[in-house]
Amino acid sequence: MTSFSKDHWLTLKATTRLPNQAWINGQYLDASDAACYDTINPATGELLVATAACTTADVDLAVAAARQTFEAGVWADQAPAQRKAVIRKLAALMMEHREELALLESLNVGKPVMDCYNLDIPGAAGCFEWYAESIDKLYGEVAPTDRNSVATITREPVGVVAAVIPWNFPLDIAAWKLAPALMAGNSVVLKPAEQSPLTALRLAGLAKQAGLPDGVFNVVTGYGEVVGQALGLHMDVDCLTFTGSTAVGKLFMRYSADSNMKQVWPETGGKSPNLIFADCDLDAAVEHAALGIFFNQGEVCSANSRILVASSIYDAFVEKFVAKANAMVVGDPLEAATEVGMLIDSQHAGRVRGFIQQAIDEGAVVACGGLGETDGCQVPPTILTGVNPAMTIAREEVFGPVAAILRFDSEAEAVALANDSVYGLAASVWTSNINCAYRVSRKLRAGTVSINTMDAIDYSVPFGGYKQSGFGRDLSLHAYDKFTQLKTTWLKLG
Ligand code: NAD
């Protein structure tokens, strides 16, 4: 992994322009009423930039631009190989601007800048590359009709796609939506979370440079209750892809019912279990358990926040896990050694602390981290033991670096505990017994089960949830199911 010093990043910061206007029809624009809101660096409290707080009129403008380009066919009617060339160019430009994008992401959301450089930015660029490469290899179908007919089944773009996304992986999740939606020929309006507009806005400029026609990709910045709601209720948006909390995901389903019955694809919250059986490689399990809950400050939808440990190894696991958590480097996101940076803002950090306090009040024990060492947007890796399944900390999504440890005495109990959640995004299983691993994974109600690894993810496999973690899938060729519709064309032979 590459590593740059804090001075390197501060030098780059001094010459980096921070985008702050919406991007509509190929231009950066202020909000129609010129309103702005503050975009703050959570690590320092510094005002980074005043960002356009778009209005419903701006949303109308962006959707109209998307609609116009879609109907005109300036993008949708290009040959797949032409669209592929443009999006591959975008991926290459993102890698050329890798340092700048990494810096913007880290300043904006508080995550370690070297993680942004080594993981987030190449991850997002690679996503565009993967979908660009896929599009001229997809075929339609011919149905098995009678000999006097020919019926083809082809995929067509849905039209105008709106993407409403969260702040935890701003560029990556934007790429997960944009890459398949654009490659399928749609025009897109992206609404980043109000906290994290910077990389989406920079991406828009790079997309123009790559040759994407104006109006095909628009970014409207601002508040969820204004911009997000206006997209959800818009009569001219055909498909809404959402990643965020379960509560807001449900709102989008209502917005759809109250407007034009647009397709809504929610990817929402999680409370993912990590099942640690007695015969596992304990050191590997500990190492990955830490990654599973403390990476990205625990602000990960699929974070393995419920750690279920076999009673016979419970004490040994907790001892090693606490030692690992205490050794993690927490602090300045621009320092190369930092492993756990800042939470997104002080309000969210306060919410995370509230969950820790409530866990203590309900009888859990702080094995490390906790409230004593918290300050501003920083919450240290925290491990809670003595947790039982009825406690709030075992049931609700914290979205911070807080692990709740529960114990089990049998395989059946482990599965029952794991499935005792309204969520079903991901799960992990640690065991050296392949039969146990497969038996358990079949019973787990989760979109992804990682066996002897953590949060397995790749462009080639679908990512998404069961139950109230949403439906529809990001990543893989299955993402095209969201952004295309099936057309039957039936020819009766004469
Ligand atoms: P959030 O639901 O508060 O916000 C997500 C988006 O919805 C933002 O763009 C926000 O502006 C918008 N929004 C908020 N209120 C709205 C409203 N009333 N109407 C319309 N739009 C509105 O989520 P967040 O705090 O940004 O992100 C954290 C959540 O995202 C967690 O629950 C996490 O699990 C989830 N998440 C899920 C996945 C997944 O793939 N399943 C991935 C990452 C994050």
Image (tube, rainbow, N blue to C red):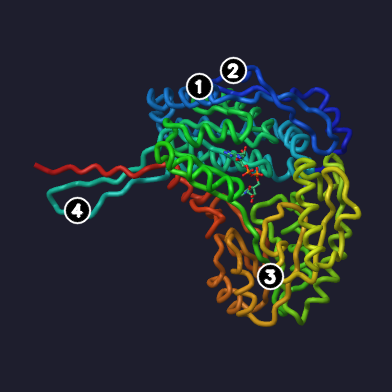
**Which residue is labeled 2 in the image?**
32
**Among numbered discs 2 and 4, the one appearing first in the sequence:** 2
Element under disc 1 = helix
**10 Å crowding of disc 4: few (<14), some (14-19), many (20+):** few
**Which residue is labeled 3 in the image?**
389
What mark, if any, has residue 145 been given in the picture? 4
Question: Which is in the foreground here, disc 2 or disc 4?
Answer: 2
**Among numbered discs 3 and 4, the one appearing first in the sequence:** 4
Quick one: 114 or 32, which is closer to the camera? 32
Q: Are marks 1 and 2 in contact (CB under 8 Å)?
A: yes
Q: Can residue 136 be spotted in the picture?
A: no
Residue 227 at x, y percent in the picture? 57, 31
Residue 370 at x, y percent in the picture? 85, 57
Residue drawn at x 68%, y 51% as measured from the top left: 300
Estimate the spatial distance between the alpha carbons at disc 4 and disc 1, rounded to whole Å. Answer: 45 Å
Residue 256 at x, y percent in the picture? 45, 41
Element under disc 4 = loop
Estimate the spatial distance between the alpha carbons at disc 2 and disc 3, rounded to whole Å. Answer: 50 Å
Q: Can residue 386 be spotted in the picture?
A: yes
What amino acid is at disc 1?
A: Leu
